[in-house]
Image: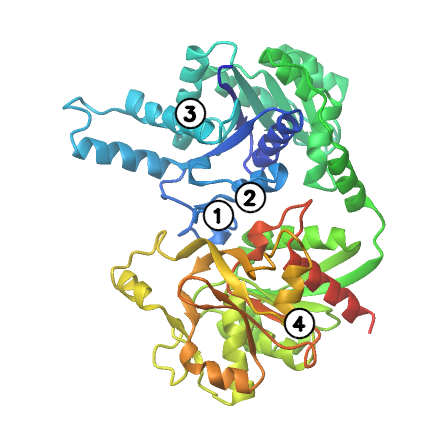
Amino acid sequence: MPTKYIFVSGGVISGLGKGIASASIAFLLKSAGFSVTLIKCENYLNIDAGTINPIEHGDPFLCEDGTEADMDIGTYEKFLDKDMHRYNFVTMGQIYKVVIDRERRFEYNGEDVEAIPHITNEIIDRINNAARLDNADIIVIELGGTVGEYQNMFYYEAARLLTLKHPGNVLHVHVSYLPTPPHLGEPKTKPTQQSVRALNTLGIQPDFIIARSEKPLDKRRRDRFSLFCNILAENVISSPDAASVYEVPLQYFQQRLLQKITQKLSLADSQPDLSAWEDLVTKIKSKKSHNITIAIVGKYFATGEYQLRDSYAALMDAIDHAAWANYAFVKTVWVDAQKVEKEGIEKFVVGIDGLIVPIGWGVRGAEGMSAAAGFARDHKIPYLGLCYGMQLAVVSFARDVIGWKKANTTENDKDTPQPVIHLMPAQKEIMTRRAYGGTMRLGAWQAKVKKGTRAWEIYSKYDCALDTKTGLTSERHRHRYEFNDKFISDFEKNGLVISARSVVENLAEIVELPKETHPFYLGTQGHPEYKSRPLRPHPIFLEFISACIHASRH
């Protein structure tokens, strides 16, 4: 059958949940037996999200193939339980660069290169390429930003052209916001009316409006949309705030959005099996058997006077997935590592059951994160170090246990006498060229896990995580600095265990303390948080949460 296209646009404000809406639509279609994929079209001129501060645009999501993408790509993976790739993620920077590079190579044969059709053609080619590479009958295209912004105009023009070329095979879903001013007490439709009007000026009429609001939509609001937005009232989908984003597909299904989409696209009507997803939502909302508190000592929490969950979105999701599987309620305490440097760690970790030091870069806050790793080690608090958290646990161990008071990572002290974490030779040349974007150790790397270690016990407990015949597992990576094997014997003599090494270059991947000396102390150079799924929580997080539950009882 011809490829079907579903464009998802946004209106009124950013951060509405277009990624959730796109993933939910794709999830319902996949559950109904259709082959479906997604693509995210970002407005910024960055080639990827790797060089963007997580406070600016949220936690970059890391794919298996090393793509550093928008965190909506992570949402797609979690909802579809399917890996996304570089062709599922497009930025305006990629589009401009490809077109300009082609012009420089004379591939346009002397033609004057213009935004339309050359930019729009490249966008359309990217969309079709994603569908082809994923063998998808249906592709859901999420348009970044909100309608009316100049940054995304060419995406909308590409959507209009596809609609024109493929009548009957293109749908437009507009996600918009209904504010409820406290002094009025009712949701207002005018902002969405204006948003749809802006969409109309671009030659696009939405087939569906997904109305985001605090409470469910009433008949009056649907009728107003129908009257002013030229849309049938039954095609306005209510999307009120939910306790969990994983409820959203069920909200849509209950309003027959799946059936309406298949009818409009002339697809076979099929009933999806949503039982596993319904069980997940029941588990999320059920009364929990355990209550635990976990401190996260990091450096990307604040934006002005506000705190951002999105700076560590993948980590927070992985904690949630593992907590639900363990029937635990997790309270997270966010600790600014710079405050730890000034005031000490003790006051920030009173009553905690576990401690995480996540990804990070550079010297700011590093001493605070290292102090947190040392505190968890000395006080037998379950500890999980992720990437930088693994490296700083090594630094802390070198200083406090081995006695090398000036040990450090060369990222923060190039003249340290004990460079226990150092830059790989291949990365040194890259750094001298200041070639930062896309040049780290990125994507999936295999590692061999050592038998008899805690890492082996964790991974082997779950069939999908470890090949017990070869001892191989795989995690996604995003870093430049590595454990310095020059000092390996000193660490091992003092009790630190290297429990996994990479297949390529034999690099230290996981460090840990034995069960006999610590209830749970593990640092991984990889990023298990990027592989966690709601129906398949990552083993490391499952066991960390379990250790925190055990700690809370004692």
Q: Are marks 3 and 2 in contact (CB under 8 Å)?
A: no
Q: Residue 64: which numbered mark, if any?
A: 1
Q: What residue is shown at x 64% (from left), y 25% (from top)? A: 33
Q: Determine whether 62 is above or below 410 in the image.
A: above
Q: Are marks 3 and 4 in contact (CB under 8 Å)?
A: no
| Front residue of 442 and 73 | 442
| Front residue of 375 and 12 | 375
The alpha-carbon separation of the residues under discs 1 and 4 comes to 35 Å
Q: Residue 128: which numbered mark, if any?
A: 3
| First in sequence: mark 1 vs mark 2 | 1
The alpha-carbon separation of the residues under discs 3 and 2 comes to 21 Å
Q: Position of residue 36 (x, y in %)?
A: 55, 28
Q: Determine whether 545 is above or below 55 in the image.
A: below
Q: Residues within 10 Å of mark 2 (few under 14, many from 20)?
A: many
- For the question of whether residue 548 can be seen, the reply is yes
- The residue identified by callout 2 is 74
| First in sequence: mark 3 vs mark 2 | 2
